[in-house]
Image: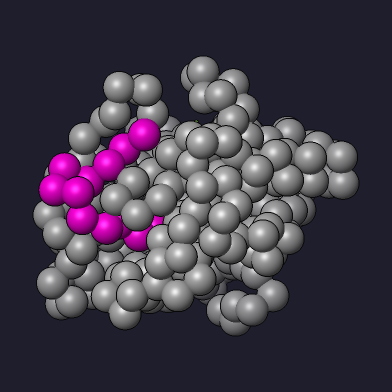
Amino acid sequence: MAVNIKTAAEIEKMRIAGRLAADVLEMIAPYVVPGVTTGELDKICHDYMVNEQQCIPAPLNYRGFPKSICSSVNQVVCHGIPSEKKKLKDGDIVNLDITVIKDGYYGDTSQMFCVGNAPEHAQRLCQVAQECLYKGISIVRPGARLGDIGHIIQQHAESHFYSVVRDYCGHGIGTEFHQDPQVLHFGKPDTGLVLKEGMTFTIEPMINAGKYHTKLKKDGWTVETKDGRLSAQWEHTLAVTADGVEVLTARKDEQF
Ligand code: MF3
Ligand code: CO
Ligand code: CO
């Protein structure tokens, strides 16, 4: 595992990419309403990234992915493909995952949206998944270990009788979409890579209402829960600082 350490100048570039990715989520939020298609959301984000931000939507053509964002509705765990045929309806929950490339550096972030009035149980899943991300972030500092992050996320999810997806994980990020290390969202304290200042990676827990098992659809991308129950995910891109963490994709409504 070759984990690279970013210089201050590189972190500054990642700060810019991260801010742009966060801005896309803030921009798209008011459009996530009953009746909109995920294809329409993709087009609005694409045009914003390309025309307003002058950045590259990283998913587009990434290993053959056909769209500019991922949109994962209800039982879809991740990597949902936006479609003109997929209309959001009142009560759905949807994750929009935005990754931009600016000046050669990546910023990767996602959040859940409730469409109209989602049922209590769906809102609760989304909230606990966000808490899982925040708990993971809260312990990032030099000397902490990746297993500590996985452990605190797993503890929180399972204390609510949810499960943590095993098949997908967070990742190092920088001049490539996915770098070492792999950041698992489950694990044991005091195990795994020791964090150092200048590491940059994502935390992006996928939390299921039912069991953790997933299945890949025939389109080769869309990942669903095997049991068909709901799944929720939130993601930030982080940098390890001298004394803690900087959330490079923080939105205006977030305080770290
Ligand atoms: N943004 C996703 C992640 O968090 C990766 C999406 S790959 C794509 O790592 F091809 F589906 F866009
Ligand atoms: Co990611
Ligand atoms: Co992402």
In the image, residue 79 lies at what x, y percent?
43, 38
Foreground of the two, 241 or 227: 227
Q: In which quarter of the image is the C terminus?
A: bottom right
Q: In the rendered image, which quarter is residue 205 located in? A: bottom left
Side (left or right) of 209 relative to 219: left
Magenta segment: 222-233
Using the image, determine if residue 159 lies above or below residue 1.
below
Side (left or right) of 221 relative to 41: left
Foreground of the two, 130 or 123: 123
Q: In the rendered image, which quarter is residue 206 located in? A: bottom left
Is residue 1 in sight in this rendering? Answer: yes
In the image, residue 240 lies at what x, y percent?
53, 61
Asked if the magenta segment contains residue 58, the reply would be no
Q: Residue visible at 45% across and 75% down? A: 117
Asked if the magenta segment contains residue 232, the reply would be yes
Q: Residue visible at 27% across and 67% down? A: 153
Q: Residue visible at 51% across and 47% down? A: 87
Q: Residue visible at 20% across and 41% down? A: 214
Foreground of the two, 34 or 135: 34
In the image, residue 46 lies at what x, y percent?
72, 39
Using the image, determine if residue 130 lies above or below residue 20.
below
Is residue 128 in sight in this rendering? Answer: no
Residue at the limit of the structure toward the top, as seen here: 64
Q: In the rendered image, which quarter is residue 176 located in? A: top right
Q: In which quarter of the image is the N terminus?
A: top left
